[in-house]
Image: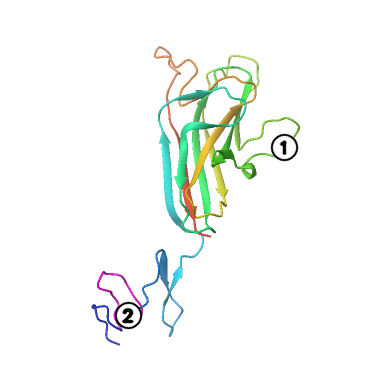
Amino acid sequence: MAITLDGTNGSLFNANGSIGIGGANYGTSGQVLTSQGSGAAPVWATASGGKILQVMQTFKTDTYSQTSQTYTVITGLTATITPTSSTSKILVMAQIGCNSGVTQDSWVFAVGRGGSVVTASIGDAASSRPRGTAVVQQADGTTSTQNAQWTIPIMYLDSPATTSATTYSIMGRTANGNTLYINRTQSDRDTSNYDARWTSSITLMEIAA
């Protein structure tokens, strides 16, 4: 069969440059050409699972602090993604730069979706213990770790089952109400050789099912 370029029957390319099969079948958005083996014509098909379809990231360089003992969205650690399929997974990855500035407390972090904690992302319930995806704890009762600085990683694979715009966030809380600092130390001094400022981020990846 001859290959033509004018969009007529038997063509490979349409006038707008799209690739077709048999001069009429140009597939739909997001599909790929898939081989059916020797002696069979290829077909358009949805990309197989495991592929990264899109990536969104928010990179936070400014500072933030809070004392809430209930989960609160950390300002600037949110990102929105619109899945292309309701079967897609969303891989949430984050790094949280934090400091406490006190000697005894726990600072607990969780993945949020739509402003609420994704309960499947946090630890099992046990009495009144705070539940989170990740935690920083200082409980030695001394000043030796008072200005310790951490970068905390989080990774969670979510199944939102939607094609609507979905906002994810990193949420934080304290156990005892002491201040949690993001991207800075408690003292935040120019005269110190250990006070620093650093960064946090949240990255979303849509993964084909």
**On the picture, is 165 further left or further right than 159?**
left
- Residue 125: which disc? 1
Q: Quadrant of residue 106?
A: top right
Q: Number of callouts in the render?
A: 2
Q: Is residue 61 above or below residue 18?
A: above
Is any atom of residue 121 visible in this view?
yes
SS at badge 2: loop
Choose between 184 and 11: the one closer to the eye: 11
Q: Examine the rendering and report whether any part of residue 149 can be seen.
A: no
- Give, as a single range, the part of the protein colored magenta: 10-21
Q: CA distance from mark 2 to mark 1?
A: 60 Å
Residue at 46 percent across and 23 percent down: it is 184
Work out which quarter of the rendered image holds the N terminus and state it. bottom left
| Residue at image mark 2 | 23
Mark 1 crowdedness (10 Å alpha carbons): few <14, some 14-19, many ≥20 = few
Q: Residue furthest top?
A: 191
Sequence order check, earlier mark of 2 and 1: 2
Q: How is the image coloured?
A: rainbow
Q: Amino acid at mark 2?
A: Gly
Residue 161 circle label: none
Left or right: where does residue 189 sit relative to residue 100?
left
Q: Element under label 1?
A: loop
